[in-house]
Image (cartoon, rainbow, N blue to C red):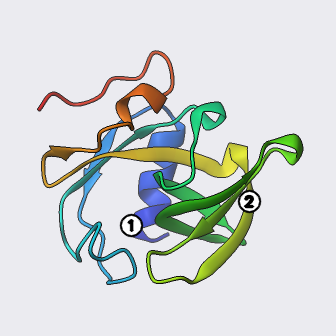
Amino acid sequence: MGLLDSMATRVAGGATVEFRPSGTSMAPLIHSRQLVSVAPVDPAKLEIGDIVLARVAGTTYLHLVSALDRARGRVQISNNRGRVNGWTAAARVYGICVAVDGRRCASATSKVRTGCAVPAE
């Protein structure tokens, strides 16, 4: 089990987590090894452009919501370089990035699942 899988398990259980993902697929939004905070998300509140922790075709990503199909209850996940990872069920979108290196993601806090805490600034 990799780092993102471990974080997804914790977030799915209701925890808000902090970790340092590696890679360049989300630059300049998230640079490799920047500290991110991810809180459980209410999938009904997702919007295109949200940074989420999601499982697509057996792989867990911290990537962007690039399309929504609410009628079919699914979300398309892509990186910030134009690569589409694929569609996944809204239930497999576990969390939303609420902060990067301590800077709040403006609209993310309102999308945190009810009853789950967001870390203080």
Give me the residue at 39% from left, 34% from top: 15
Mark positioned earlier in the residue sequence (2 or 1): 1
**Label 2 crowd bin: few (<14), some (14–19), many (20+), radius 10 Å:** some
| Residue, disc 1 | 3
Look at label 1 and name its amino acid: Leu
**Label 1 crowd bin: few (<14), some (14–19), many (20+), radius 10 Å:** few
Q: Secondary structure at mark 2?
A: strand
Give me the residue at 49% from left, 69% from top: 1
| Left or right placement of residue 101 versus residue 22 in this view | left
Residue 21, horizontal then vertical, whole percent = 30, 69
Give me the residue at 71% from left, 46% from top: 90
| Left or right placement of residue 25 versus residue 120 in this view | right
Number of marks drawn: 2
| Residue, disc 2 | 88
Residue 67 sits in quarter = bottom right
Question: Residues under labels 2 and 1: Cα distance?
Answer: 20 Å
